[in-house]
Image: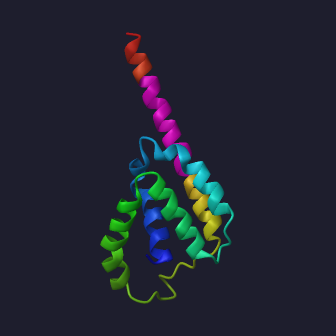
Amino acid sequence: MEPEKVIIVFFKWLRENPNIFMPTAWQDLPKLETEIAESADDELFPIAMTISKWCANHGLGETLKEDVVKNKKDFDDAGEPTPTTMQPLTNITQVLRQSIEDRYKKLQKELDAENQSNTDNDSK
């Protein structure tokens, strides 16, 4: 799999499909964030490999492969980026780490709210 596509699919999951990490994979998002911190911004292959291994360890490896293949046509049809549509992959480790941290915190809040709701219902 091409590293850029793995990273893009993972970003897409974080932004558009965070429930893919539930119920247990989300707990290890901080570990993934820490592992990504060890890579340099220009090292897309190690970042993609870290994401791929993490996904495989959390039962998401096949889903990642399927989404990369499914989105391959979209990637290929996009053509060459133009100066107005091109978004450079600078500070990729920082952006990815921040996205993971933000999503983890949001999922934690949602889970806490759900648990609080269940507790409130139990006490009635």
Figure disc tally: 0
Where residue 111 sits in the image (x, y, percent)? 47, 35
Residue 114: in magenta span: yes
Q: Residue at x 36, y 61 (%)?
A: 62
Is residue 2 or residue 122 the one in the foreground? 2
Q: Is residue 106 left or right of residue 40?
A: left
Q: Specify the quadrant that holds the N terminus.
A: bottom left
Q: On the image, which quarter does residue 45 sit in?
A: bottom right
Q: Is the stretch drawn in magenta largely helix, strand or loop?
A: helix
Where residue 109 sits in the image (x, y, percent)? 52, 37
Vertical position of residue 102 compared to residue 89: above or below: above
Q: Residue at x 65, y 64 (%)?
A: 94
Vertical position of residue 107 compared to residue 55: above or below: above
Where residue 6 sits in the image (x, y, percent)? 46, 70
Where residue 105 sits in the image (x, y, percent)? 56, 44
Q: Is residue 64 left or right of residue 3?
A: left
Q: Is residue 2 visible?
A: yes
Is residue 24 or residue 102 the one in the foreground? 24
Q: Is residue 14 visible?
A: no
Vertical position of residue 101 compared to residue 53: above or below: above
What colour scheme has been applied to the protein in the rendered image? rainbow
What is the span of residues highlighted in magenta in the rendered image? 102-117
Residue 23: in magenta span: no
Q: Residue at x 60, y 49 (%)?
A: 30
Q: Residue at x 48, y 54 (%)?
A: 57
